[in-house]
Image: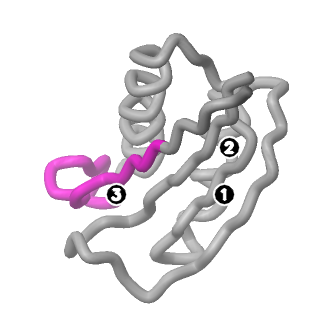
Amino acid sequence: VSDRVSAHGYVPALDGLTIAGKPDLIRCAHDVIDEIETLLDTNDLGFEAVSKLTAYIGDREYRDCVHSVLKERLGRGEPTFTELIVDGFSQPGCPFALDLDCVVV
């Protein structure tokens, strides 16, 4: 018997999250992953339980940043990964969002 846990994290907007007038995407990515990590912790799970991760990225320019932070934070775990470049989000100003699924055995 297994259970499934899904999580979604996003940056609502880049307002105030800038360095020298440019978006601080590294901080944003860490903030999103912190949100998701809190939800996982609440369910006594860690990133090793993640089976699928989907990144929705609003600008190709953000890809390298999102990838580097995911690699750093997920460590050796390598879930199935899907990346989608999207034209926009329901939250204006949102640069990217992450969805993940965990299967708990």
Q: Which residue is tagged 1? A: 64
Q: Residue furthest bottom?
A: 87
| Nearest-to-viewer mark from 2 and 3 | 2
Instruction: Give whichever of discs 2 and 3 has the lower sequence position.
Output: 3
Tell me the amino acid under the disc marked 3: Pro
Q: Nearer the viewer, residue 8 or 91?
A: 8
Mark number, residue 31: none
Front-most of 10 and 72? 10
Residue interval drawn in magenta: 7-22
Quarter occupied by the N terminus: top right
Question: Hey, what amino acid is under mark 1?
Answer: Asp
85 in relation to 64, above or below: below
Q: Are marks 1 and 2 in contact (CB under 8 Å)?
A: yes
**Dot 1 lies on which element?**
helix
Question: Residue at label 2?
Answer: 68
The tag on residue 23 is 3
Residue 8 among magenta residues:
yes
Q: CA distance from mark 1 to mark 2?
A: 6 Å
Disc 3 residue crowd, few under 14, some 14–19, many 20+, Cα 10 Å: some
The C terminus, quarter of image: top right
What's the residue at 61%, 18% (across, down)? Answer: 46
* Image side of residue 69 versus residue 20, left or right: right
Crowding near the residue tagged with mark 1, few <14, some 14–19, many ≥20 C-alpha atoms within 10 Å: few
